[in-house]
């Protein structure tokens, strides 16, 4: 692999990683929608079905599952976001040590 290939791939990776914040906002917005739907189900649907325990559980079971899945996906999304941020930090460290070694070699 030539140095030009490494620079191109590093530049491409950095360009992709600059968009990570947008994806993180999508994950947070999705979790917000799921939590809002859960609150709506608890405040509107559940009181209408309090005549028996079975109907109350039936009314709230699906929203609870969605909240659980939403939290799970939120955790996965944030984990991936942090992995990308770590990769950016490592790339910047690598570029800093490369430029330091190049400037040290000239003197």
Image (spheres, helix red, strand yellow):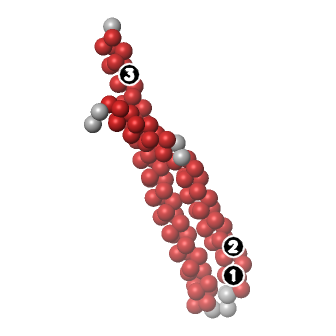
Q: List x then y, in percent, for residue 18.
A: 52, 42
Q: Earlier in the sequence, mark 2 or mark 3?
A: 2
Q: List x then y, in percent, for residue 72.
A: 48, 64
Q: Secondary structure at mark 3?
A: helix
Q: List x then y, in percent, for residue 64.
A: 56, 75
Q: Is disc 2 in contact with disc 1, using a CB cutoff of under 8 Å? A: yes
Image label count: 3
Image quadrant assignment for residue 30: bottom right
Q: Secondary structure at mark 2?
A: helix
Q: Which residue does the numbered mark 2 point to in the structure image?
A: 40
Q: Is disc 1 in contact with disc 3, using a CB cutoff of under 8 Å? A: no
Name the mark nearer the viewer: 1 or 3: 3
| Residue, far top | 107
Q: Is residue 39 left or right of residue 99?
A: right
The residue at 47%/49% (across/down) is 81
Residue 40 seen from this side: yes
The residue at 58%/86% (across/down) is 58
Observer-nearest residue: 23 or 3? 3
Q: Is residue 6 left or right of residue 63?
A: left
Image quadrant assignment for residue 97: top left
Q: Which residue does the numbered mark 1 point to in the structure image?
A: 45
Between the residue at mark 2 and the residue at mark 1, the CA separation in whole angstroms equals 7 Å
Determine whether 61 is above or below 53 in the image.
above
Image quadrant assignment for residue 5: top left
Q: Which residue does the numbered mark 3 point to in the structure image?
A: 99
């Amino acid at each position: 692999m030539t140095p030009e290939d490494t620079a191109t791939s590093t530049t491409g990776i950095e360009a992709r990683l600059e968009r990570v914040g947008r994806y993180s906002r999508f994950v947070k917005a999705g979790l917000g929608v799921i939590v809002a739907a859960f609150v709506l189900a608890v405040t509107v649907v559940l009181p209408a079905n309090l005549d028996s325990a079975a109907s109350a559980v039936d009314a709230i079971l699906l929203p609870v599952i969605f909240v659980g899945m939403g939290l799970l996906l939120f955790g996965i999304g944030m984990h991936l976001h942090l992995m990308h941020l770590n990769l950016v930090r490592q790339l910047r460290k690598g570029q800093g040590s490369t430029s330091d070694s190049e400037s040290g070699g000239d003197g």
